[in-house]
């Protein structure tokens, strides 16, 4: 039995409807890799660093790895 | 750390708010620095909640210059505003429409720089066609002088200010004159009198 296929537009629409429900979006990330970009679009649309500690803790996540820059300098 | 920048959270961020500017360094904005990932931010708010600086250079806006070419809304929020170099920050966002500047106590201003043109010359400044909100308890003058000297001019449709300082009315007049072709709404809260609200062109007399 083949896996059911849903057009990507429908998947996008589902994620878009859940934009205000972070818990649901996080659960959607677990469906498959294809869901990750469409859920991250909403999960990370707004990022706030309230305190210096938040920033010092979180900024490592956003650094672009140096080896990748050497492979793809256009990045 | 996300090995592929296109899957990094920063790649999806449209609104970035940083309330502790003092821990951001110029290294953060260099190649590979974490700030460089936020290249698609449309709404940017930066500020510092700390109340005292040894000098203005302690809090630098430089790492945010040109953060994202698509920034349209910029909000600067400080307890004490380091006013110099704000012009350069504004000029680094070519699509900037809305600007809000809040200083809860006052402004640190370098008198020499306040009357000087921006240190960095940008060929095309932003059009600044949206709203301008200034809430500056130390007075509007240092910021207004910088706005009036922007090379591309200002074309705000909405102006909103509380008046705290005796020079604020004259600064408001200068801004209104500069935006006279585009202004639609002017909101003023004068703490020593009643609120004034003008919606152009119905009533434009102050």
Image: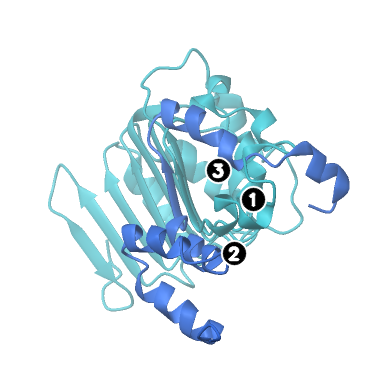
Mark toward the viewer: 3 or 1:
1
Quadrant of residue A37 in the image?
bottom right
Mark 2 or 1 closer to N-term? 1
The reply to whether label 3 and label 1 mark residues of one chain is yes
First in sequence: mark 3 vs mark 2: 2
User: Would you call the spot at circle 1 few (<14 residues within 10 Å), some (14-19), or many (20 or more)?
Assistant: many
Disc 3 from disc 1: Cα separation: 11 Å
Question: According to the image, label 3 marks what residue?
Answer: B146
Chain-order first, disc 3 or disc 1: 1
The residue at which mark 2 appears reads as B127
- The cyan-tinted chain is B
Q: How far apart are marks 2 and 1 (CA)?
A: 10 Å
In the image, which disc is placed on residue B91? 1
Res B90 seen here: yes
**In the image, residue B180 above or below residue B25:** below
Please say whether residue B154 is visible from this viewpoint.
no
């Amino acid at each position: 039995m083949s896996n059911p296929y849903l057009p990507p537009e429908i998947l996008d629409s589902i994620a878009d409807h859940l934009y205000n429900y972070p818990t649901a979006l996080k659960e959607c990330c677990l469906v498959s890799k294809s869901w990750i970009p469409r859920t991250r679009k909403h999960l990370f649309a707004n990022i706030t660093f309230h305190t210096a500690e938040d920033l010092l803790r979180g900024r490592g996540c956003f650094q672009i790895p140096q080896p990748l820059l050497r492979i793809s300098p256009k990045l | 750390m996300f090995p592929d920048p296109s899957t990094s959270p920063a790649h999806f961020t449209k609104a970035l708010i940083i309330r502790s500017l003092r821990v951001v360094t110029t290294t953060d904005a260099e190649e590979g620095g974490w700030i460089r990932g936020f290249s698609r931010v449309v709404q940017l708010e930066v500020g510092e909640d700390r109340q005292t600086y040894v000098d203005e250079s302690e809090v630098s806006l430089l790492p945010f210059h040109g953060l994202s070419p698509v920034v349209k809304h910029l909000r600067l929020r400080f307890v004490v505003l380091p006013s110099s170099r704000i012009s350069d920050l504004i000029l680094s966002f070519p699509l900037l429409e809305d600007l809000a500047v809040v200083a809860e106590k006052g402004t640190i201003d370098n008198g020499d720089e306040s009357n000087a043109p921006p240190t960095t010359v940008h060929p095309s400044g932003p059009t600044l066609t949206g709203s301008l909100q200034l809430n500056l308890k130390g007075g509007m003058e240092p910021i207004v002088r910088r706005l009036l000297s922007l090379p591309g001019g200002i074309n705000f449709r909405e102006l909103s200010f509380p008046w705290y300082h005796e020079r604020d009315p004259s600064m408001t007049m200068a801004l209104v004159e500069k935006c006279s072709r585009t202004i639609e709404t002017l909101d003023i809260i004068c703490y020593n009198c009643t609120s004034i609200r003008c919606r152009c062109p119905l009533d434009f007399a102050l």
